Image: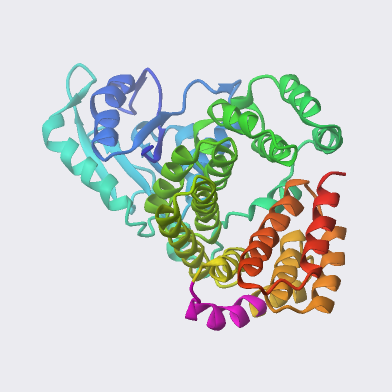
């Protein structure tokens, strides 16, 4: 499991205090801060020399905002550190630890009341009495994992807004970044994988590229089924961006599509353990198990297939329970229940809930392909040809990426095959499946 990142805000090299005493901040980092971060099962990432002429670069902002944890050394009231701390407190309600060297001057009034950990400095300017301070600092990091609000902005300003992560498919539309690159990637998605690769090669160092551009590139590879290119791109990203929930979820999706389901499963389960249940994470995990179930069926492993189908249904159900507004894992759960050899009593109870969830999303405005595809699958499950035909038209008009109708056609094929075995096939379901496949090939 990859440990969460902890961003370190502090001066560099040797700096004088207001009293003239020199402090070796590199020693403070290596001897005190870094070991305590590691002891708390976090991964340190220090703000290296990323500033030119005092200007903080975009990657610096991204690291500061996206890292799950941070520590700020307030000694000497360094202007850069305080600027970064103010930004951190504005965007993160919790998980920022503060410390300062004792006997080096008073802290500024604005931060004096904050809960800070003092440490000693020896005559050589290096941290002293580390054995006594280190456990306290490590405990503070572990306490920060409980996500208690420590930002004075969030503590004192009622209703101060939290920053919410955007859904994968709207992230690209809402983030502000280079319009030129946006247009180039949009055109490249129409041309295919090689065109998207060309855009990547033109961007230079991915870790230093604006996060919005990197995410658009990442999702553009998904649009052209560049699963291996998605996988290859993640290590090139800045660590804070690479470790965001969205990137890790989509990495799991790409790994599974590339035939590396075991790795995908590990990433997704680690993500759930670290960040909690999510409709999208569980939805992708459900797909991993569904693919394994199909492989087991094809291999004639009947008993194993039953167990994998149960795991897939359970994963989709947990995803739907994590967010009842997201119908995607819900429709997958009820579809797989339709396929199971024995009737699942939960299906009858879930069908109207899934239907209500998707209708609320559509009524809210700006429905996407998956909303109409969900409505289509619900109509097929209900054996309602007219409703299915209407939903098919809406879905085909909303297709953005070829793999979307392929996925829906695959689900409908599973339903058709199960109904054939039971002698329930109506005939028109296969026509809908064919229309989806035809759209995917365009």
Q: In this view, does 106 lie to the left or right of 219?
A: left
Instruction: In the rendered view, tell whether residue 300 sits above or below residue 79.
Output: below
In the image, residue 426 above or below residue 129:
below
Read off the magenta span: 342-355
Residue 187 appearing in the image: yes
- Where in the figure is residue 167, as x and y percent of width and height? 63, 55
Q: Is residue 261 left or right of residue 131?
A: right
In this view, the residue in front, 308 or 302, is 302
Image: 164 above or below 233? below
Number of numbered callouts drawn: 0
Along the viewing direction, whichever of 216 and 22 lies nearer the viewer: 216
Query: In percent of the image, x 34 and y 42: which residue is there?
Result: 107
The majority secondary structure of the magenta stretch comes to helix
Viewed as shown, does residue 354 lie left or right of 431?
Answer: left
* 212 is within the stretch colored magenta: no
- Work out whether residue 13 or residue 132 is closer to the camera in this orientation and state it: 132
| Residue 223 lies in quadrant | top right
Q: Which residue is drawn at 28% across and 33% down?
A: 38
Would you say residue 348 sits in the magenta stretch?
yes
Question: Quadrant of the image for the C terminus?
Answer: top right
Query: Which residue is painted at 29% across and 29% down in the image?
Result: 34
The picture quadrant where one finds residue 263 is top left
Residue 64 image offset from top left, x and y in percent: 50, 39
**Residue 94 position within the rendered picture, expressed as x and y whole percent measured from the top left:** 41, 54
């Amino acid at each position: 499991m990859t440990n969460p990142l902890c961003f370190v805000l502090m001066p560099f090299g040797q700096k004088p205090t207001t009293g003239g005493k020199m402090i070796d901040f590199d020693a403070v980092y290596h001897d005190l801060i870094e070991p305590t971060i590691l002891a708390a099962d976090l991964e340190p990432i220090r703000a290296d020399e990323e500033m030119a002429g005092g200007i903080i670069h975009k990657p610096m902002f991204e690291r500061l905002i996206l890292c799950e944890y941070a520590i700020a050394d307030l000694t000497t009231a360094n202007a850069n550190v305080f600027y970064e701390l103010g930004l951190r407190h504005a965007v993160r309600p919790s998980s920022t630890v503060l410390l300062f060297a004792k006997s080096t001057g008073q802290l500024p009034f604005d931060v004096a009341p904050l809960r800070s950990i003092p440490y000693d400095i020896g005559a050589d300017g290096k941290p002293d009495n580390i054995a006594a301070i280190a456990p306290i600092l490590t405990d503070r990091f572990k306490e920060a994992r409980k996500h208690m609000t420590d930002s004075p902005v969030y503590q004192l300003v009622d209703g101060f807004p939290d920053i919410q992560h955007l859904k994968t498919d709207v992230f690209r539309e809402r983030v502000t970044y280079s319009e030129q690159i946006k247009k180039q990637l949009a055109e490249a998605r129409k041309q295919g994988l090689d065109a998207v690769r060309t855009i990547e090669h033109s961007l230079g160092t991915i870790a230093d590229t604006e996060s919005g551009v990197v995410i658009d590139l990442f999702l553009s590879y998904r649009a052209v089924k560049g699963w291996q290119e998605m996988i290859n791109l993640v290590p090139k990203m800045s660590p804070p961006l690479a470790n965001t929930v969205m990137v890790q979820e989509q990495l799991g999706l790409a790994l599974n599509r590339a035939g590396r389901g075991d790795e995908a499963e590990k990433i997704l389960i680690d993500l759930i353990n670290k960040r909690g249940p999510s409709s999208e994470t569980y939805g992708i995990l459900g797909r991993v198990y569904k693919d394994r179930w199909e492989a087991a069926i094809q291999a004639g492993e009947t008993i194993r297939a039953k167990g994998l189908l149960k795991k897939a249904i359970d994963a989709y159900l947990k995803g739907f329970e994590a967010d009842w507004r997201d119908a995607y894992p819900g429709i997958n759960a009820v579809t797989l229940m339709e396929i199971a050899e024995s009737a699942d009593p939960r299906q009858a109870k879930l069908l109207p809930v899934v239907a209500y969830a998707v209708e609320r999303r559509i009524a809210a405005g700006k429905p996407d392909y998956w909303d109409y595809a969900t409505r289509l699958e619900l109509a097929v499950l209900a054996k309602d040809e007219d409703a299915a035909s209407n939903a098919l038209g809406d879905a085909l008009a909303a297709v953005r990426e070829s793999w979307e109708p392929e996925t829906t056609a695959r689900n409908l094929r599973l339903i058709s095959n199960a109904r054939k075995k039971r002698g329930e096939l109506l005939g028109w379901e296969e026509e809908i499946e064919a229309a989806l496949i035809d759209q995917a090939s365009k």
